[in-house]
Image: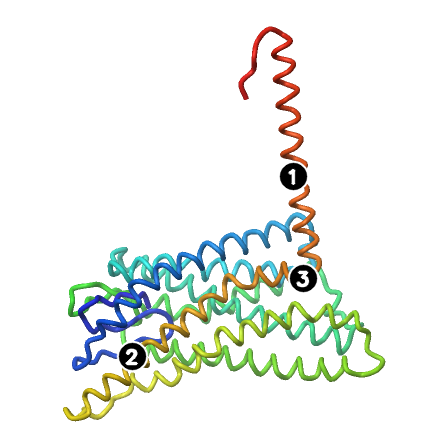
Amino acid sequence: MAETNSINETTDYPYNYTDDYEDEMCYRTNINKFRAIFIPVFFSIVVILSLFGNILVIVILSKYENLKSLTNAFILNLAMSDLLFTAGLPFWAYSHMYGWTLGEPACKIVNFVFYIGFYSSGIVLILMTIHRYVAVMNPFSDIVSTKGFYSVLASVMIWAVSILVASPAFVFTKVMNTDSDQNICDYNDSYGKLWGIYQQNILFLVSSVVFVFCYSLIIYRLLRPTAQRRKNKTLKLIFILMVVFFVTWGPYNIVIFLNSSSYFQKPPVKSSDTISACEKDTQQQYTISVSRFLAYSHCCLNPVFYVFVGVKFKNHLKKMMKSLGHRNTSIRSRHSRLTITSLTGGEELSM
């Protein structure tokens, strides 16, 4: 699953759910150079933004919100999922440049944690959408106002299911050596890779069905003359989070599904068709890389929409910034008083 293409060799691209099949007739020098330049830079930006944004969300929730609320529990779990997903990116960037040099136990653990982050994120968004659907369609339901134990139970279920679904990544990934003597961390055969691809496709499909079904009925309900406009504001944040998930992961899921046919046995290519086949392969690799960049940016986008769309988060952030500003002012004022006192006492205190 780690990205380990060398510049002059045609190796698998074993990073996340889909890989490039080896084709001895095509040398992917340009695409490998493209990946070698942009992947480390892009991942570095995503990691920095994701760490800053998601940690900020967790701090705001812990400081100003009631974590026993089911909605807040979902948002907290989503931020933690994005952080787990983010944790794998530096390893893949390093592996892409130098090969996998961290050993097989680390290979299994990094893959496992990465997949847990991905699947838990999708599961949380599905549950958030269903919860909001129930809140609009049946606002007096016990599910809407549930707190405490049920929030903990929902969190435990999210992570239990995510760990179960991600477990094949821990069992079937291993370190392998390529023709260029560069190690890669990946599923050990094509069947494992296909399992990873189709498993992700299923999650995306389920997410899309839930999204379309729930929000179609919600929008229909809110268009009624008796609907309260206030409800529309409560839906905006979760609606945008789901749309962002669909837009960022949609193209990538389509591309890897179409590319999955490359893992099945293919008839040999005639020498006269080699150039055409290689051109098609190059276009396919660029498409996979660009769609992957878009998909992996998802982990750093959620906090942005919390701040710009979520009214409470925006207010909490302003409150926290003011609090930090007052604290700095208080520290400077204290420093000035201590300095003046020290000078009047005949000695200067260095702070």
- Left or right of 82? Residue 16 is left
Image coordinates of residue 79 in percent, x first then y, are 55, 59
Mark identifier at residue 190: 2
Image coordinates of residue 199 in percent, x first then y, are 43, 78
Residue that appears at 76% across and 79% down: 222
- Left or right of 120? Residue 287 is left
Query: Residue type at mark 1?
Result: Gly
Q: Quadrant of the C terminus?
A: top right
How many neighbours does mark 2 have within 10 angstroms: few (below 14), some (14-19), or many (20 or more)? some
Circle 1 is placed at which residue position? 325
* Disc 3, SS: loop
Q: Nearer the viewer, mark 3 or mark 1?
A: 1
Query: Residue type at mark 3?
Result: Gly
How many neighbours does mark 3 have within 10 angstroms: few (below 14), some (14-19), or many (20 or more)? some
How many neighbours does mark 1 have within 10 angstroms: few (below 14), some (14-19), or many (20 or more)? few
Residue that appears at 19% across and 63% down: 182
Image coordinates of residue 98 in percent, x first then y, are 24, 58
How far apart are labels 3 and 1 at the CA level?
23 Å
Query: Residue type at mark 2?
Result: Ser
Indicate the quadrant where residue 16 lies: bottom left
N-terminal of the two: label 3 or label 1?
3
Circle 3 is placed at which residue position? 310
